[in-house]
Amino acid sequence: MKAKIQIDPPARILRRHGLDASGGAQRFHTANVLRRIQKYMPYRTGATIKLTVAQTDVNVPEIATETPYARMLFNGKSRGGKPIRYTKTKNPHAGPRWDKAVSAAEGAAMAADLQRYLRGKGV
């Protein structure tokens, strides 16, 4: 006896479970990172954080901060190459490379959040 088994391609399976780049799991993770990364961004007036929240579309798997000064703040260097001193009175975790800071400090918690989300979806 021969049996022929047909399964969906991996891309379709991932999409069905919300695990593709525009799926529910990715939207959840992008929103979670956006919420958590704000602790590591410089805060003087709050304008950069507010712009980041406004410019980031959780349907796209990236955090957007599109301002003329964002690259300097992100890298921690002024136009002349001098290191930027971040004011930490309003945001004590502020500093350069927000992506690495949030990943190092809260990566395990974000992974656990995503696992709980996926378990709740039955994945």
Image (cartoon, rainbow, N blue to C red):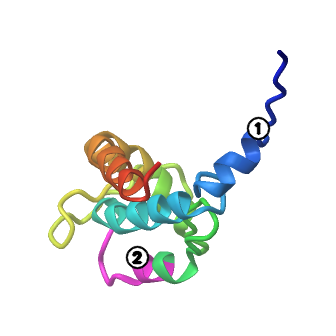
**Camera-side residue of 103 and 122:** 122
Residue that sits furthest to the front in the current view: 1
Please provide the residue range marked out in magenta.
42-51
Q: Is residue 4 left or right of residue 30?
A: right
- Callout 1: SS: loop
Please, what is the three-letter code of the amino acid marked with disc 2?
Ile
Q: Is residue 103 left or right of residue 79?
A: left
**Camera-side residue of 2 and 14:** 2
Residue at x 61%, y 62% (from the top left corner): 23
Tell whether position 6 is magenta.
no
Q: Quote the CA–CA distance across marks 2 and 1.
A: 45 Å
Q: Position of residue 4 (x, y in %)?
A: 84, 27
Residue at x 51%, y 58% (from the top left corner): 25
Residue at x 59%, y 75% (from the top left corner): 57
Q: Quadrant of residue 58?
A: bottom right
Q: Position of residue 101 (x, y in %)?
A: 34, 46
Q: Which mark is residue 7?
A: 1
**Camera-side residue of 84 and 12:** 12
Q: Position of residue 7 (x, y in %)?
A: 76, 38
Residue at x 37%, y 57% (from the top left corner): 117
| Residue designated by label 2 | 49
